[in-house]
Image (spheres, helix red, strand yellow):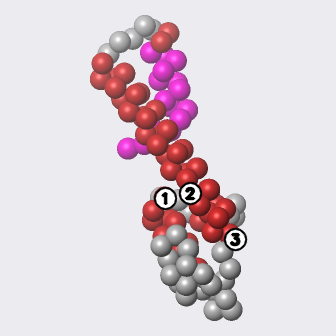
Amino acid sequence: MEIPDEKVAMMAIILSMQNFTDPVAMQSISDAALQRKKDIERFNRAKKLWKKFRDVPVNEDDEIDINWCGFTKGTPREDIWHWFEEEFDLSVAKDLMGM
């Protein structure tokens, strides 16, 4: 379960104000912060790769015209979009194309 950033921040503030040292609670906050860091890193890798993918030429059948990142020439562009969504756990339209 992912804890939203606002909740992690609020928990940290409350714990620091109360000088709270419950190891289970502290571990939960630490785990949530680490997961958020990993999510941000994964999203940034996806954005960098997406920028490179935008420059890949496609033919009239909407297939890539060159080999790219392990995909062979002729791979439908939509297949690569689906790969992005599965590999990086995001929405191409919402997260990468801003739709």
- The quadrant of the rendering that contains the N terminus is top left
Q: Amino acid at mark 2?
A: Ala
Q: Which mark is residue 55?
A: 3
Q: Secondary structure at mark 3?
A: loop
Pick whichever, 30 or 18, lies toward us.
30
**Which is nearer the N-term, disc 2 or disc 1?**
2
Residue for badge 2: 46
Question: Mark 2: few, some, or many residues within 10 Å (few <14, many ≥20)?
Answer: many
Q: Magenta region: which residues?
A: 1-15
Residue for badge 1: 88
Residue positioned 38% across, 33% down in the render = 31
Q: Please state the horizontal and vertical placement of residue 66, each as a whole percent of the image.
A: 60, 81
Q: Please state the horizontal and vertical placement of residue 14, each as a whole percent of the image.
A: 48, 16
Q: Which mark is residue 70?
A: none
**86 shown above or below 62:** above
Q: Secondary structure at mark 2?
A: helix
Residue 58 makes an appearance in the image: yes
Q: Quadrant of residue 52?
A: bottom right
Q: Amino acid at mark 3?
A: Asp
Question: Mark 3: few, some, or many residues within 10 Å (few <14, many ≥20)?
Answer: few
Q: Nearer the viewer, mark 1 or mark 3?
A: 3
